[in-house]
Amino acid sequence: MEQNNLLTEFEQPHNEPASTGQRFANYLIDIIVYYILVIILTIPTGLMTSMAYGGGSIGLYYLVALGTFFGYYILLEGGKGRTIGKMVTKTRVITTNGEPLTYSKVFLRTLCRIVPFEFISAFIGPQMWHDKWTDTMVVKDK
């Protein structure tokens, strides 16, 4: 039985974790893309609400921003495990046990990102909270 565990251990590909620099670059690129998307999507929203109600609706802006945030991460990470930032830095998200990433796991991972001060977890330990809480990790893409 112990021999089977050793064989299984050797059969699994080794995934090298992404560096802190790569993770930081992912964040910067993704946040820039996110803000560009929000600006693009809120301009027509603002025009529509100002024409319909005579003024903008801040609640609608927040809804567009939150929807864009979840949509960006869920669609991109759920599809191939890569956001635009991860494509540029040649990294991807995988589960810690090697199973394929599911949309529900990516949804939970994205939900964890909105925890206040979650970004500080990058300085506390080897894993960010949204990785730790969802059993995922960012690795260098081969």
Image: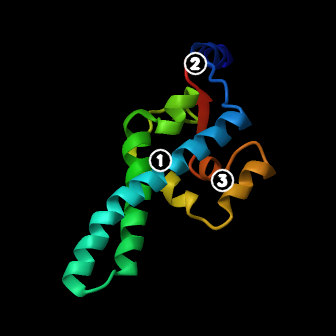
Image x and y of residue 23, in percent: 65, 39
**Which quadrant is home to the N terminus?**
top right
Mark 2 secondary-structure assignment: loop
In the image, 48 versus 121, the foreground residue is 48
The kind of residue tagged 2 is: Gln
Residue behind mark 1:
33
Relative to 118, residue 138 above or below: above
How busy is the neighbourhood of tag 1: few (under 14 within 10 Å), some, or many (20 plus)? some
Which badge, 3 or 2, is on the more N-terminal residue?
A: 2
Q: Which amino acid does label 3 sit on?
A: Trp
Considering the numbered disc 3 on the image, is that residue within a helix, a strand or a loop? helix
Q: How far apart are marks 3 and 1 (CA)?
A: 22 Å
Residue 57 visible here: yes
Q: Which mark is residue 12?
A: 2
Q: Which of marks 1 and 2 is nearer the N terminus?
A: 2
Q: According to the image, label 3 marks what residue?
A: 129
Give the CA separation, mark 1 to mark 2: 34 Å
Is residue 98 among the parts visible in the rendering?
no
**Mark 3 to mark 2 CA distance (whole Å):** 25 Å
Quarter-of-image position of residue 44: bottom left
